[in-house]
Image (cartoon, rainbow, N blue to C red):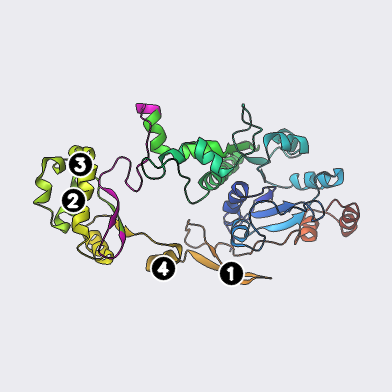
């Protein structure tokens, strides 16, 4: 089967999470993604991103091939430039000044290959007062406003449980690269696509950010309640917790009928959507008193049957035990040469008729000879480059 991106060659210079997440979006749809690392003797530190055979690293670098190039040696940089001449995309997440020093900035690459697309992810942007600062997900969560609206009121800022700035900047960059590839079909020229953890985080604030830009409102922490829609939040039942979302008059009517709250909700504080928004505590208390009378599963079934979005709150083991998650096949097996069969989380995008590749994360330099031969290097050249410690 020809995969949608099988004609695209990607040179992956990325590290840690944001850049590798970007490249993984392309690799999962068949792009020939070549992960470039420094040789062992050059890169002696463990670095960030977790142990090579750990879940984090295996998840983010799957479906790639791996080669080593010592970009600090002129011979190694020359190898990289020969690859650029035949590639479609280069992705990097160095600090802005580093790539210029290495000679892998867009202007340098475009001179070699005018069709090349460079995808760059930084902490704070390619220029400006913070451009040379080291970027990290938690810092972006704080500076982008996410931590200020996460957590219970009065408890202080709280980070979310995933590296959301890393992940979203990677996905935004991948979208930009795909847009540039489509644009190249018209123009014949490549482009520089760049984003940052900070830009991605502010963009992900979405309506919370626009509450400020349009209305001058500074969003506050709302805990498990939705910041604007009432009632939406967590409620205790006889044997556990459920998530309930019932904003708007029609949804409110359904929940009132299902819970049998016709008498209680005649109170003026609960009679209209505007009144309920102003009296969240009374709304929640009224629902909570009733929900304690039955089990979580029974309420979930009854409320969903009535058309009221309701669901459980799972731990990760419960997520993958859920019948719908199993039906969607959200994990898939990969055969790793050292670890044996491991299960990874699949891309959430489905395209009927396309089977995503299922290759494990490569070992360092696993495909060096193979890839260089494909790009026109002779066996003698490869041997000489190894002797020069350029690979």
- Secondary structure beneath dot 4 equals helix
Sequence-wise, the earlier of marks 4 and 3 is: 3
- Cβ atoms under marks 1 and 3 closer than 8 Å: no
Q: Residues within 10 Å of mark 2 (few under 14, many from 20)?
A: some
Number of numbered markers: 4
Sequence-wise, the earlier of marks 1 and 4 is: 4
Marks 1/4: CA–CA distance: 19 Å
Instruction: Give the number of the mark in front: 4 or 2.
Output: 2
Marks 4/3: CA–CA distance: 38 Å
Query: Is 215 a magenta residue?
Result: yes
The residue closer to the viewer here, 121 or 83, is 121
The residue closer to the viewer here, 3 or 290, is 290
Residue drawn at (90%, 51%) of the image: 388
Query: Is 131 a magenta residue?
Result: no
Sequence-wise, the earlier of marks 2 and 1 is: 2
Q: In this orientation, does residue 106 appear?
A: yes
Residue 50's label in the rendered image is none
The residue closer to the viewer here, 75 or 272, is 272
Q: Which residue is mark 1?
A: 342
Q: Which residue is mark 2?
A: 286
Residue drawn at (72%, 62%) of the image: 363
Instruction: Give the number of the mark in front: 2 or 1.
Output: 2
Q: Position of residue 249 (x, y in %)?
A: 18, 45
Q: Is residue 246 left or right of residue 42?
A: left
- Secondary structure beneath dot 3 equals helix
Query: Where are the magenta residues, as a range?
Result: 213-241
Q: Which residue is mark 3?
A: 276
Q: Residues within 10 Å of mark 4 (few under 14, many from 20)?
A: few
Q: Which residue is mark 4?
A: 327
């Amino acid at each position: 089967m020809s995969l949608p991106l099988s004609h695209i060659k990607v040179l992956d210079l990325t590290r840690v999470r944001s850049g590798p997440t970007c490249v993984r979006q392309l690799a999962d749809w068949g792009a020939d993604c070549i992960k470039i690392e420094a040789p062992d003797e050059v890169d002696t530190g463990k670095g960030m991103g977790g142990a090579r055979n750990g879940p984090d690293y295996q998840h983010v670098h799957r479906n790639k091939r791996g080669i080593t190039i010592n970009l600090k040696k002129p011979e190694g940089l020359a190898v990289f430039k020969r690859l650029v001449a035949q590639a479609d995309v280069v992705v990097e997440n160095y600090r802005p000044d580093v790539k210029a020093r290495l000679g892998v900035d867009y202007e340098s690459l475009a001179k070699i290959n005018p069709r090349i697309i460079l995808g760059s992810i930084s902490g704070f942007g390619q220029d400006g007062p913070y451009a040379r600062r080291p970027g990290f997900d938690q810092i972006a969560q704080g500076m982008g406003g996410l931590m200020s609206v996460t957590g219970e009121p009065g408890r202080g800022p709280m980070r979310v449980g995933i590296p959301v700035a890393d992940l979203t900047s990677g996905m935004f960059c991948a979208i930009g690269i795909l847009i540039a590839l489509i644009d190249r079909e018209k123009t014949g020229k490549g482009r520089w696509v760049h984003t940052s953890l900070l830009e991605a985080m502010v963009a992900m604030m979405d309506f919370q950010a626009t509450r400020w830009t349009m209305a001058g409102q500074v969003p506050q922490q709302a805990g498990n309640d939705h910041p604007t829609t009432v009632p939406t939040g967590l409620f205790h039942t006889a044997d556990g917790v459920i998530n309930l979302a019932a904003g708007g008059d029609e949804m409110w009517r359904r929940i009132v009928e299902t819970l049998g709250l016709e008498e209680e909700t005649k109170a003026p504080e609960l009679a209209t959507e505007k009144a309920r928004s102003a009296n969240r505590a009374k709304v929640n208390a009224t629902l909570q008193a009733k929900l304690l009378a039955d089990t979580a599963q029974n309420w979930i079934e009854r409320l969903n049957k009535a058309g009221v979005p309701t669901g459980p709150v799972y731990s990760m083991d419960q997520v993958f035990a859920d019948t719908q998650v199993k039906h969607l096949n959200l994990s898939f097996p990969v055969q790793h040469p050292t670890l044996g069969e491991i299960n990874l989380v699949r891309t959430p995008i489905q395209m009927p008729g396309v089977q995503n590749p299922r290759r494990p994360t490569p070992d360092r330099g696993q495909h060096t000879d193979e890839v260089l031969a494909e790009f026109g290097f002779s066996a003698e050249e490869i041997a000489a480059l190894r002797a020069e410690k350029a690979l």
